[in-house]
Amino acid sequence: MKHRKVILFAAAALSLTLACNITNVPTGGSTPNVGATPNVGSMPTEVLLPSPTPIPSTPVNLRAGLASLNTYSLVIESNFSGPAQADYSQTHIEIQKSTDLDATSTHYVITQSSESDSEPSMTDSYRYTIGNAKCSGSDEDGWDYTNPPTPQQSEMVELLSEMMDLVPLIDTPTFVGSETMNGIMANHFTFRVSGLGLQSGAEVTANQGDYWLAQDGQYIVKYYLVTETVDTTTQTTLHMDVLIEVTNVNQPVEISFPAGCVQ
């Protein structure tokens, strides 16, 4: 059950439907009278066609979009529950990044429970990268310091990270308006996941997505999707919500190895 939940979330998070709202503005003004003789010495009337006003709705890949920022905090969170009342899985990842310090800290919290478990399980750990050096673990379980990788290893890790860059599911978005989100001027879009419940026959009780794209950079500032279906025969409910949020853009941040990381 736990593996299935992880697969379902990964499939939803890595899917992408390219969409772009382009509004064609009707042509205004007068149309020249075909066949009429123009007045001598006059200039022909120029018909100006209004330009389309597209609102870009497709985000750039998450990693690529944030690469231009000096500092930021990024939260990626997923919650999945059902079909049994005790079945629950939550993944919370919080990343702080400073380009100036060449440093990144990542905090992972993963909680899972099911009917077959006597009590929920939780993983709480950190990963720090400063320059090429890395340290991971926790005060409770201990820390593991890793010597800087070779240039060859770094090259392969960089290639893999580019291949696995994330773009969340977006399905035929609708432009809401220009808004300030987390201190960033952004375009707000809404969408619904098309076809939800068609294959299973389940009743859809929640299906709403909202996201905000930075007007400068087209990266995701905030993304939230909530879906829920109910089996009308068994009355079992499956619920999933996903949050992606970027805050503290270009704000001062301190990242350093914990005391337990021996260099």
Image (spheres, rainbow, N blue to C red):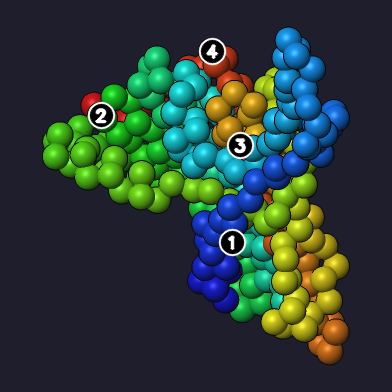
For residue 97, above or below residue 115? above
Q: Are marks 3 and 1 in contact (CB under 8 Å)?
A: no
Coordinates of residue 185 in the picture (x, y in percent) = 70, 22
Q: Nearer the viewer, mark 1 or mark 4?
A: 1
Q: Which residue is mark 1?
A: 12
Q: Nearer the viewer, mark 3 or mark 2?
A: 3
Sooner in the amino-acid sequence: mark 3 or mark 1: 1
For residue 34, above or below residue 255? below
Rendered residue at 81%/39% (across/down) = 26
Q: In the rendered structure, which amino acid carries the disc numbered 4?
A: Pro
Sooner in the amino-acid sequence: mark 1 or mark 4: 1
Q: CA distance from mark 2 to mark 4?
A: 21 Å
Q: CA distance from mark 3 to mark 2?
A: 27 Å
Residue 142 placement, left or right of 54: left
Sooner in the amino-acid sequence: mark 1 or mark 2: 1
The disc at residue 132 is 2
**How many tags in the picture?**
4
Question: SS for tag 1?
Answer: helix
Q: Which residue is mark 3?
A: 220
